Image (tube, rainbow, N blue to C red):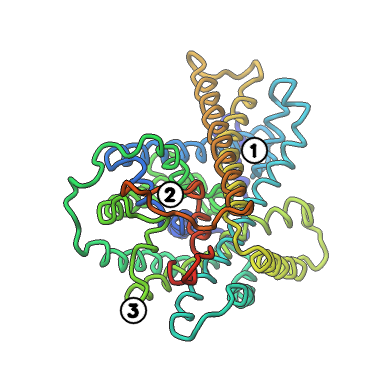
Amino acid sequence: MADKGGYNPYENRHVAKPISDFGAFILLLKSVVGTGVLSLPLAFYFAGIINGVILLILVCIMLIHGIQLLIICMVECSRRMQIGYATFPQAMEYSFGQGPKCFRYCSKAGGYFCDGVLGFSQFGVCVVYTVFVSANFKQLIDFYFGVADIRIYVACIGLLLIGPFLIRKLKYLIPFNIVATILIYSGFFMMMYYVFLDMPSISERNIFFGPIELLPLFFGIAIFSITSVGVMLAIESEMSNPQHYIGWFGVLDWAILIVMISYIFFGIVGYWRYGDKIEDSISLNIPTDQVLAQVSKGFIAMAIFLSYPLAGYVVIDIIMNHYWNKSGELKHAFLKEELLRVGMVLLTTITGILVPNLGPLLSLVGALTISLLNLVFPALIEICLYYPPEYNYGRLKWKLVKDIMYVIIGLVILVQGTVFAILSMIKEWGGGRQGDTTGATDGTTTMDTTTVGNITTVLTTAIAEPTQEPAFRFL
């Protein structure tokens, strides 16, 4: 599509410090593989093994197609606007201006709304990362040296994050993310030691289907574990060969293939081992008083620590390049960006200190942002781009039908996720007992509404306040 009309945006895209295909591959792996993977065994409990594999593959294909569709539309917008690179908000504003009258009226507001959703989503992830790392190190340190308040650890971790977050270019974050990828997969492999101990017969598990009434929760976990829209777009924008990013056997496909295989394996063996005793996070099922388990959790915490600069990159990019330094003529831009980065770390740290139990709120943010950014917005952009009479939606208008289906699915996810998040907020902040995942009398597990499935599920459980033992002993 890029060479259609004689203008190729790829040839006119200029990046100061471009990243290689391998660097993009590493950054992609780390942007997707995070704390959400720890809830995948629970997802397979909800869906059953065979059904879970099929649904996870379908969800992965749907979400990655949404990302590829978005990038293709952004390139097409760049071609029509004859610029090297159209950002997500620019593409949304331009495409809405090409669409039906109702979209043209809100085209400019659509661009601002897109920026807000992207920035708020990534800011929330950064807060979660800060508190998650703090909770893990609190567990390890408190085990040997005594109990301390979680807020002390959040403050310390926040100060330590300032240094890595001052790195401005994605290219220089690649070594950090190579180390983070090695650490997180090493932590997972160490967990496998406990998973493969005393494995029961697989016939004792739900081979085909899990509890049907809990199946919607599977989709929550799967969706929030697979995609990271803002970081994925940022990686593509900084590549030296961005045309290698999408398409069959592109960098994105190879990275997601490895992620999907890892997720299926981790989800199946975790559920196989613990069955209906599986917790919100599999890390809650492994021992807390053994060195190997502690090292595993330490590795995962360190990997998430090193991932913070990548997660926060999008927020800084939006503020600097879309608003503060949009013209590129801001005086002392380097110094001001560094101050902005310090300010963001301090703001995420203060947020974590004031409200360390962010699970319900961020579940709501996640439900809103993922459905909009990954499904609804890309579909609406394509609908508007091909609305003018000189374009068409393909044979039998298949593109229009597909995009309408994406919008419907996205809205269903948005409504369902919002409902679960609100129920969780009422339970957590309205007087209900936090962290209540008590087993039912029939021997099955009664699942809390907080298992809506994004990375904050792990966090919420990690820092809840049980009645007897401190939360760090259960992470």
Q: In the image, 50: left or right of 39?
A: left
Disc 2/disc 1 C-alpha distance (Å): 21 Å
Q: Residue furthest right?
A: 331
Residue wearing tag 1 = 78
Residue type (three-letter) at the residue carrying disc 3: Val
In the picture, the disc for residue 230 is none
Residue wearing tag 2 = 251
Q: Can you tell which of label 3 and label 1 is closer to the viewer?
A: 3
In the picture, the disc for residue 291 is 3
Percent position of residue 31, x then y: 49, 56
For label 2, the SS is helix
Residue type (three-letter) at the residue carrying disc 2: Val
Q: Tell me which corner region of the image, top left, top right, bottom left or bottom right, holds residue 297.
A: bottom left
Q: In the image, 303: left or right of 151?
A: left
Percent position of residue 44, x then y: 34, 46
For label 1, the SS is helix
Q: Residue furthest top?
A: 396
Tell me what residue is drawn at x 53 percent, y 63 percent.
Answer: 464
Disc 3/disc 1 C-alpha distance (Å): 53 Å
